[in-house]
Amino acid sequence: MSKDIVTDPPEISQVKTVEVPSWVNAAWKKLNTHKKLESAISMYMEGLRMEIDHPSMALVSFVSAIEVVSLMVFHPNRCSECGNYMEISRRFRATLALVAGDTTAEYLRPAYDSRSRTVHRGALYGGELIPGVSPFSMFMVSPESEFQIGMVRGIRSAARSLLLMAVQGTLPVRSRLRSPQSGTH
Ligand SMILES: [Zn+2]
């Protein structure tokens, strides 16, 4: 009997084993030396916590996470006069294109502007303003549902893919964003 317990203890055989992917060790080390990436992942996690009740704020979080990755992929262009970052939204879109096909990237294109209107003007796009159940139709999706289901989920999924690439070290080598215009703003 005791032999059975040693080889196959029931209390352990009932524990679900979780397979840890082989890249986790290296990723863990990377996070310890790359604080910005660690912050980006925390920001992504914040987005997950907010997504259902606060979709506009969740979008802000997911876009922030993508922006951190975008700076790992592209050298930022800075204004030669004031030193401010330039073409942030174009860099954001170029980063999205790494994980989204053309159609999806085009669909997600307005996300950066939406995020900016939330940050700078307090704009809300999801169901935050409609307490309770929003009007439901089989044939029509409300703009609020469209935002929450389409835009926020799409950006969340892109952020997740990009963060995974970042921790796995599979992002493309950092390059300069090809610029249609340069100089100052
Ligand atoms: Zn400037």
Image (spheres, rainbow, N blue to C red):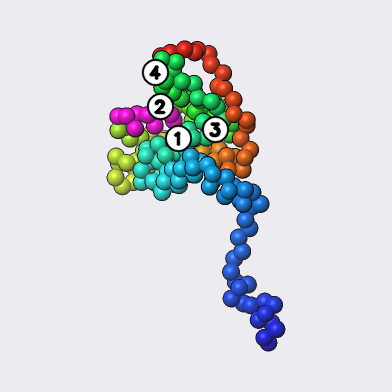
The label on residue 82 is 4
Q: Nearer the viewer, mark 4 or mark 1?
A: 4
- Which residue is label 3 attached to? 72
User: Local crowd at mark 1 within 10 Å, few (<14), some, or many (≥20)?
Assistant: many
- Is the residue indicated by label 4 positioned so its CB lies within 8 Å of ligand 1? yes
- Which residue is label 1 attached to? 63
Is residue 27 or residue 53 the one in the foreground?
27
Relative side of 140 to 168, left or right: left
At x 52%, y 35%, the residue is 69
Give coordinates of residue 47: x percent, y percent.
42, 44
Q: Sequence-wise, which precedes: disc 3 or disc 4?
A: 3
Q: Is residue 32 magenta?
A: no
Is residue 7 or residue 25 the one in the foreground?
25
- Which residue is label 2 attached to? 113
Contact, CB < 8 Å: mark 4 with mark 1?
A: no
- Majority SS type along the magenta span: helix
Q: Amino acid at mark 3?
A: Met
